[in-house]
Amino acid sequence: MLNAECLVDVIPTSVLSLVVIMRNVIPAVLVFAVLMLTYRSLGQNPGPNEPVYRVNVRVEVVDAQVIHKKTKRVIRSLKREDFQVYEDNVAQEITSFSQDETPLSVVLLFDLTDSVRPVLKSLADGALQALQHLKPEDEVAVMTYAASARLIEGFTTDRELTVAAVARASRMKSDEAAFFNEGIFQAAAQLSRSKIPASRSVIIWLTDDVPNIPTEEIRMHYGRSLHGGDLHTEQEAMRQALQTDTVVCTLIKRSDISEMEDSRGSSSKVVERMLYPPGDVYKYAQATGGEVVESSGKKLQIKLAELIDDLRQRYTLSYHPSARKPAGRFCAIKIKLSPAVLKSYGRMVVAAKKGYYR
């Protein structure tokens, strides 16, 4: 997770004074760790007359993408002063700003439905080329899901291992239901086990956008891999994604089944979706600041490479929340652009997470 809370019990004033120099150089969450390591390496302890302060610093980090509303072009040349951050409608000071500096932790999440599996095969053939758009330090894990999720390859920077895992996934079959929420929940949980501290967490999700509605009947007949376990809801999956600062991006490969489902808007199906929300790719993207890209099978490798480029070029902004909130409370975040940027570029859309749970 990119959120951080640093609690230091004993920081003498002689050391604490260095914060003024360092606070604009590196994120505050690292400042105190550096100071304490430096102080302890000198073998010093606070003297009997040395004032001691208890410092509690919280850093909230937001991953943002700016898109021109008319042309759909991603804007990659903005500066810190072009952004304004609000938490619960209160303006916040941006304490650090970067672009394409923080490593990525990516979970490739693949739907195992019949219409997606053939596309996986073609993706596996060209996956290495698409993954070259990542930086060497970026890590990737591969997961599949049907009624439940399965880890095929854990986080690694070895692209050959990742490609081999995608190839294994393309040979897998399942006659189970496709439960979107369970797949997203487990992929976000996997991101909490990232090997890279303070990396940017991303799910790249390949699906035909045809979820099974998790009614009791569907779970009983097509949810065999659950083995009687609890199925995570849309609300639980969304919370898990926000708690792990996960950006959910989706590559949609439309199928005949997709088109058929879009045309079937029966009232009974509407009621089922209300009672058992199956998960929605656009809803996950909107809440987490991700994007949804539709693609044919032939262009999937190109779209994946373009998506990775967009992810790497996103802006990373951090701030110290100006007010403490009760644990478990949802804090709403809104990113705005300065009037000068809007005047220069016209109407823009900022994709960023809608908030976080304290």
Image: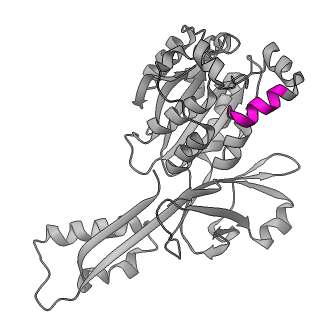
Looking at the image, which residue is at 68% across and 33% down? Answer: 276
Image mark count: 0
Question: Is residue 142 among the parts visible in the rendering?
Answer: yes
Vertical side of 325 occupied by 278: above or below: above
Locate residue 183, reporting x and y percent: 56, 29
Classified by dominant secondary structure, the portion drawn in magenta counts as helix
Q: Quadrant of residue 134?
A: top right
Magenta span contains residue 43: no
How was this image coloured?
Answer: one colour
Query: Which residue lies at the image location 58% right of the left edge and 10% below the top edge?
Result: 174
Q: Position of residue 105 (x, y in %)?
A: 48, 40
- In the image, taking residue 213 as reference, residue 124 lies left or right, namely left
User: Residue shown at 25%/80% (left/top)?
Assistant: 15
Instruction: Tell me which residue sits at (39%, 64%) in the image.
Output: 5
- In terms of depth relative to the viewer, which is nearer, 98 or 186? 186
Is residue 280 in view? no
Q: Position of residue 314 (x, y in %)?
A: 62, 50
Q: In the image, is residue 309 above or below residue 10?
A: above
Q: Nearer the viewer, residue 151 or 186?
A: 186
Percent position of residue 88, x then y? 64, 69
- In this view, which residue lies farthest toward the bottom? 49
Q: Which residues are magenta?
A: 268-279
Does 278 appear in magenta? yes
Pick whichever, 282 or 347, lies toward us.
Answer: 282
